[in-house]
Image: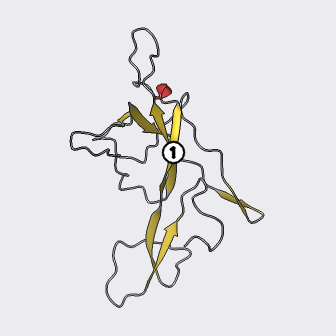
């Protein structure tokens, strides 16, 4: 059996103070795997069961991806799909959604402008004032309030 993932969900929006989540990305026909993962070591049509060391591994997020994102995880049940074509070799074979993966992003911001956070830092030093800004992924991971603690 194998798994893959959908493209990233569109951003959530606010409508009269209520979070509006776009329809989740689906599996099966028309599936477009997210380009946010480094698939050089693990291809997008990914083996679900553990590798030689007994651990299931997902590809890492590319280093240039700095925002939070959400994808639907898609499963291929290894059903026979037709004469002469093996199962789980095409994204159309991954018809079963079996979860969402939420990727949060944490930025280290200048203390003077934490809400805008025009530049994100990699490190801080002792006695340096800084603020942390957690970016919520789309798809209903957070509520539009201060209750996300």
Quarter of the image for residue 89 reads top left
- Near-viewer residue (129 or 86): 86
Indicate left or right for 13 with 60 as reference. Answer: right
Indicate left or right for 23 with 97 as reference. Answer: right
Residue sitting farthest toward the bottom? 127
Indicate left or right for 127 with 107 as reference. Answer: left
Which quadrant of the rendered structure holds the N terminus?
top left
Q: Residue at x 38, y 36 (%)?
A: 44
Quarter of the image for residue 66 reads bottom left
Which quadrant of the rendered structure holds the C terminus?
bottom right
Residue sitting farthest toward the right? 16
Residue 103 visible, this angle: yes
Q: Residue at x 52, y 33 (%)?
A: 96
Q: Residue at x 54, y 34 (%)?
A: 27
Dot 1: what SS?
strand
Question: Where is residue 5 shown, x and y percent of the image?
Answer: 46, 40
- Near-viewer residue (139 or 117): 139
- Near-viewer residue (110 or 52): 52
Question: Where is residue 31 shown, x and y percent of the image?
Answer: 52, 33
Residue sitting farthest toward the left? 52
Question: Where is residue 63 shown, x and y percent of the image?
Answer: 35, 56
**Which residue position holds label 1?**
99
Indicate left or right for 10 with 121 as reference. Answer: right
Quarter of the image for residue 147 reads bottom right
Q: Is residue 1 above or below residue 39?
A: above
Residues packed near mark 1 inside 10 Å, few (<14), some (14 to 19) or many (20 plus): few
């Amino acid at each position: 059996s194998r798994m893959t993932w959908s493209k990233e969900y569109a951003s959530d929006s606010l409508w009269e103070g209520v979070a509006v989540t776009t329809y989740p990305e689906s599996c099966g026909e028309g599936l477009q795997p997210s380009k946010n993962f480094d698939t050089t070591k693990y291809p997008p049509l990914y083996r679900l069961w553990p590798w030689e060391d007994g651990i299931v591994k997902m590809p890492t997020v590319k280093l240039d991806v700095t925002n939070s994102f959400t994808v639907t995880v898609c499963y291929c049940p290894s059903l026979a799909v037709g004469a002469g074509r093996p199962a789980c070799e095409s994204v159309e074979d991954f018809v079963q959604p079996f979860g969402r993966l939420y990727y949060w992003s944490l930025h280290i911001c200048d203390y003077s402008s934490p809400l805008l956070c025009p530049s994100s830092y990699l490190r801080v030093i002792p006695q340096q004032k800084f603020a942390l800004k957690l970016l919520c992924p789309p798809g209903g991971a957070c509520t539009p309030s201060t209750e996300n603690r």
